[in-house]
């Protein structure tokens, strides 16, 4: 059995498995079965991946995400599982160092899968040409006798009533069984199987276009001083390449110092305002909601960070890194980075005020993770300037930091944490009951335990919102099999059953 045929068998087997375990089910235990098939197939087709250090780390993170999916079954845990699976696939099939380029390779796999599958199918059929030629010969020799037999059968059936009756019964039996056969096929499920085939194939099929892999490997973390070759009759002399001849680097250095001086002065004014207004003399006022304060600070931070990275990448991308008199330029960059770091702390303090007065919410938690990424990004910008690193290094390291942060964030069931925190601190914050009731169904036990706080919730068809949500949740859970089991739903259903809740009959 050649390699292409083995691939084809894996695609088909994976598609049927995908259909059986995921059709009208939630991602849960079935994801473990799917993952076992995918990882086994991946390492079978690309055995060299098992020795790759990055693949091993990705495997650990991926298994952790699978565990959080089974434990919490949140949207974030599912998203983290999918992202780590895609990265694990890319790093197993191609040579990569950057998650950005690996993402490009995965994208190419999905876009070009139809073409890759056609090549696999053609290659697998080539090995069967000799065998199929022999069967084709027998088939051609049989066509004329079969046609003649059919013609004479029709003639004899028209002339013989008994034979005609037998033929009619056989025809009826064939028609009935064909109808039964086609009634088994549910077109929705057929389409779902084809979708599974596309997913499995796109993950396992490696395209022949290695554009992202080649570009990734060709990049370096270390800046290299560019030199030009001056040819003379007697010898070859290497000289540094300067954008503005011999005085070019000096002019760039001066322009950079002036730029960072002006930017630092502007940001210093902003930070001084924050020290007075946010750090020392903050007062809660209903006239100016805190969410506006957080939004303004976050928007300013985004602009400042984008500007900071752009300016640093502009001035520290070439030979200016090796210019001996760039000391004050570096000091200006360091001051700019530190001031942006202080701006991050100011936004963090704004977000703290917001949480202290109104409790936890998705966006407020999102701001915290955003600030963590920004702080890490500023540290890597500092490393880039001080250690003469490339822009590729900057984006590569920060992409991995984002992956690690995503995996770490999936360890917490944020909906349950938000509900518990807001209810526990209701004496200090304004409890938004509508928001708490809008959280995922895994918060139903927490809400039910504090149901007196939600008595004024909006009515739905004569029932209060909590009763309605519990009934709908239990009704939905009845539709799932053991394939959709996960710890969070199992615990929620157990609690609701102990409270004598039942799914509505209609």
Image (cartoon, rainbow, N blue to C red):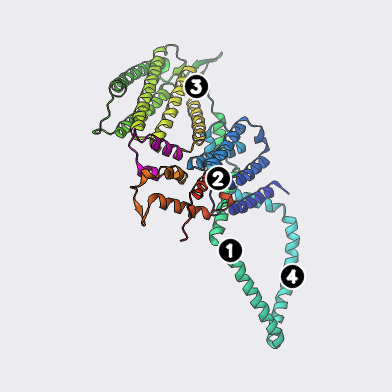
**Which of the two marks, 4 or 3, is nearer to us in this view?**
3
Q: Label 3: state its secondary structure.
A: loop
**Which of the two marks, 4 or 2, is nearer to us in this view?**
2
Q: Label 4: state its secondary structure.
A: helix
Of residues 71 and 396, the one nearer the viewer is: 71
Where is 184 relative to 19, above or below?
A: below
Q: How crowded is mark 1: few (under 14 residues within 10 Å), some or many (20 or more)?
A: few
Separation of disc 1 and disc 4 at Cα? 32 Å
Separation of disc 4 and disc 3 at Cα? 73 Å
Q: Can residue 274 be seen in this view?
A: yes
Image position, residue 353 (x, y; %): 34, 29
Of residues 323 and 455, the one nearer the viewer is: 455
Overall secondary structure of the magenta stretch? helix
Q: Label 1: state its secondary structure.
A: loop
- The magenta segment: 415-438
Q: Residues within 10 Å of mark 3 (few under 14, many from 20)?
A: many
Quadrant of residue 50 in the image?
A: top right
Of residues 430 and 247, the one nearer the viewer is: 430
Image position, residue 450 (x, y; %): 41, 42
Q: Which of marks 1 and 3 is nearer the N terminus?
A: 1
Q: Earlier in the sequence, mark 1 or mark 2?
A: 1
Separation of disc 1 and disc 2 at Cα? 30 Å
Identify the residue under disc 1: 185
Q: Looking at the image, how many numbered discs can be counted on the residues?
A: 4
Identify the residue under disc 4: 142
Q: Can residue 317 be seen in this view?
A: no
Cβ atoms at labels 1 and 4 below 8 Å apart: no
Identify the residue under disc 2: 486
Identify the residue under disc 3: 389
Check if residue 433 falls in the magenta segment. Answer: yes
């Amino acid at each position: 059995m050649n390699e292409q045929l083995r691939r084809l068998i894996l695609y088909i087997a994976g598609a049927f498995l995908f259909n059986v375990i995921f059709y009208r089910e939630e991602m849960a235990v079935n994801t473990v079965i799917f993952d076992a098939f995918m990882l086994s197939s991946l390492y079978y087709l690309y055995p060299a991946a098992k020795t790759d250090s990055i693949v091993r780390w990705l495997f650990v993170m991926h298994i952790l995400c699978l565990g959080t999916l089974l434990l919490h079954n949140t949207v974030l845990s599912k998203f983290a599982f999918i992202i780590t699976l895609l990265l694990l696939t890319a790093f197993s099939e191609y040579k990569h160092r950057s998650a950005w380029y690996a993402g490009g390779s995965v994208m190419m796999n999905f876009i070009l899968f139809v073409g890759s599958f056609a090549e696999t199918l053609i290659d697998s059929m080539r090995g069967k040409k000799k065998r199929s030629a022999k069967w084709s010969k027998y088939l051609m020799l049989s066509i004329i006798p079969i046609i003649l037999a059919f013609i004479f059968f029709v003639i004899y059936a028209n002339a013989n009533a008994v034979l005609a009756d037998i033929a009619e019964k056989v025809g009826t039996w064939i028609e009935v069984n064909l109808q039964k056969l086609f009634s088994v096929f549910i077109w929705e499920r057929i389409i779902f199987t084809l979708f599974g085939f596309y997913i499995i194939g796109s993950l396992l099929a490696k395209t022949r276009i290695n554009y992202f892999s080649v570009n990734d490997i060709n990049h370096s973390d270390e800046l290299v001083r560019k030199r030009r070759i001056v040819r003379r009759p007697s010898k070859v002399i290497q000289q540094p390449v300067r954008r503005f001849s011999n005085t070019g680097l000096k002019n760039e250095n001066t322009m950079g110092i002036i730029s960072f001086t002006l930017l630092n002065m502007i940001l210093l004014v902003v930070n001084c305002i924050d020290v007075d207004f946010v750090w020392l003399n903050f007062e809660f006022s209903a006239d100016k909601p805190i969410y506006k304060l957080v939004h303004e600070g976050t928007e300013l931070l985004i602009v400042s960070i984008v500007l900071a990275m752009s300016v640093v990448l502009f001035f520290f991308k070439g030979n200016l890194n090796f210019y001996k008199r760039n000391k004050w330029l570096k000091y200006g960059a360091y001051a700019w980075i530190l001031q942006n770091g202080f701006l991050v702390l100011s936004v963090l303090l704004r977000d703290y005020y917001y949480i202290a007065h109104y409790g936890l919410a998705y966006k407020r938690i999102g701001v915290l993770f955003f600030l963590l990424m920004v702080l890490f990004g500023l540290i890597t910008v500092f490393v880039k300037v001080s250690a003469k690193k490339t822009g590729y290094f900057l984006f590569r390291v920060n992409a991995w930091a984002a992956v690690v942060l995503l995996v770490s964030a999936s360890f917490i069931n944020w909906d349950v944490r938000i509900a518990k925190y807001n209810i526990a601190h209701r004496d200090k914050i304004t409890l938004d009951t509508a928001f708490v009731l809008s959280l995922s169904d895994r918060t139903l036990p927490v809400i039910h335990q504090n149901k007196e706080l939600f008595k004024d919730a909006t009515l739905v068809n004569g029932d209060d919102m909590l009763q309605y949500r519990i009934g709908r949740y239990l009704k939905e859970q009845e539709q799932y099999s053991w394939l959709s089991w996960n710890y969070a739903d199992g615990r929620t259903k157990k609690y609701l059953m102990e409270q004598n809740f039942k799914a509505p009959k209609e």
